[in-house]
Image (cartoon, rainbow, N blue to C red):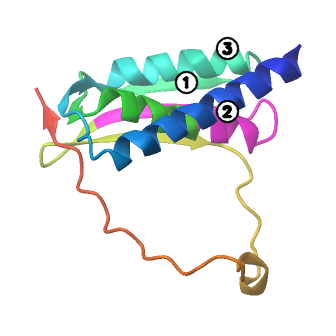
């Protein structure tokens, strides 16, 4: 049963990603509305705890933390980061989600795990000759916070 649930979750994520790509192809702009990052962090941690009940997942929110953004996309990114932590760290590795205001009317939302990290990879092993070179997008601006 667990395997079926895992596959269903994986398929759901793939469908959501494909829908997002289709929306982006349509040129639909991302929403820009106040998002309660503390609430978002709590929701994402609750969902992750359902997937892995034995894993310690903590949430740290410093005051009220709001940002202007697209709540659905932020929820998706946060869910992806938590899923990565659940799937790529040993069982029972602690995971934390933190939302905090920063100076300059910005906020920070982080997912941190206490796993061993990625092993060093020799440069030759990390290259893939079958992929075309890509350009890196410019870094996004920090999300502005609102009161």
Instruction: Decide which of tag 1 and tag 2 comes sooner along the chain.
Output: 1
State how far apart marks 3 and 1 are (Cα). 13 Å
Q: Which residue is drawn at the image coordinates 42% and 72% (left, top)?
A: 136
Considering the image in quadrants, where does the N terminus appear?
A: top right
Considering the image in quadrants, where does the C terminus appear?
A: top left
Report the residue marked by disc 2. 94
Instruction: Decide which of tag 3 and tag 1 comes sooner along the chain.
Output: 3
In this view, the residue in front, 140 or 92, is 140
Is residue 95 on the magenta stretch? yes
* Secondary structure found at label 1: strand
Report the residue marked by disc 1. 58
State how far apart marks 1 and 2 are (Cα). 8 Å
Give percent across and percent down for residue 103: 16, 47
Q: Quick check: 35 left or right of 48?
A: left
Question: Where is 87 relative to 33, above or below?
Answer: below
Report the residue marked by disc 3. 50
């Amino acid at each position: 049963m667990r395997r079926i649930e895992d596959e269903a979750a994986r398929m759901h994520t793939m469908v959501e990603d494909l829908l997002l790509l289709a929306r982006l192809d349509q040129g639909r702009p991302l929403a820009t509305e106040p998002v309660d990052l503390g609430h978002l962090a709590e929701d994402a941690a609750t969902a992750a705890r359902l997937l892995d009940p034995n894993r310690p997942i903590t949430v740290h929110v410093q005051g009220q933390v709001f940002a202007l953004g697209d709540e659905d996309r932020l929820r998706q990114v946060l869910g992806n980061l938590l899923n990565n932590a659940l799937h790529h760290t040993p069982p029972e590795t602690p995971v934390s989600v933190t939302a905090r205001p920063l100076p300059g009317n910005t906020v920070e939302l982080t997912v941190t795990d206490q796993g061993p990290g990625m092993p060093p990879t020799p440069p030759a092993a990390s290259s893939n000759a079958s992929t075309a070179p890509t350009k890196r997008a410019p870094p996004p601006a920090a999300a502005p916070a609102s009161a």
